[in-house]
Image: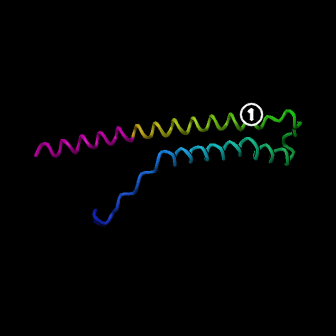
Amino acid sequence: MHEEDVSPQPRPHALTVLVLLVLAALTLSYLAAYALPDALVASQIMPPWPHETDPRPHWMLAGFVSLFGTLSAISCVIRFLSWRQLRCIDAIADEGTGSK
């Protein structure tokens, strides 16, 4: 393939990435807080708890906050490392054009 044939892909918008992070955190926290304990109760590995003392909403909120924070921190670190690497590549390219 020639360079002219390849069109650059548009970068995802920050809002799109944020929505995907929220959806991933919500999905995983729901599965860990509701689906897994329900499966354990259904298979009689874990005893059911009374409805007035149901800890699952708290587990889901704690899981969501933890996962969203972790995923956000990882994305910030990856973005920083990418920015730093691109700076190094640009510096190498500038050295190559300046010496000619």
Point 80% across, 48% down: residue: 39
**Magenta stretch: includes residue 55:** no
Q: Position of residue 65 (x, y in %)?
A: 63, 35
- Residue type highlighted by circle 1: His
| Closer to the camera in the image, 9 or 83 | 9
Image spot of residue 4 (x, y percent)? 28, 64
What predominant SS class does the magenta segment belong to? Answer: helix
Q: Is residue 16 or residue 53 the one in the foreground?
A: 16
Answer with left or right where residue 13 lies relative to residue 7.
right
Q: Is the residue 40 above or below the residue 54 in the image?
A: below
Residue 94 included in the magenta stretch of the image: yes
Position of 25 with respect to 100 (left or right) is right
**Mark 1 element type:** helix
Residue 62 percent location from the top left of the image: 68, 33
Please rate how many residues cluster around mark 1, counting C-alpha atoms within 10 Å: few if below 14, some from 14 to 19, many from 20.
few
Tell whether 24 sits left or right of 17. Answer: right
Rendered residue at 22%/45% (across/down): 93
Q: Which residue is mark 1?
A: 58
At 74% across and 34% down in the image, what residue appears?
Answer: 58
Frontmost residue, 32 versus 7: 7
Residue 74 x, y percent position in the rendering: 50, 38
| Left or right: 46 in relation to 79 | right
Residue segment shown in magenta: 82-100
For residue 96, what is the image quadrant?
top left
Position of residue 31 relative to residue 58, above or below, is below
**Residue in the foreground of this view, choosing between 1 and 26:** 26
- Which residue is at a point 41% across and 37% down the rendered structure image? 80
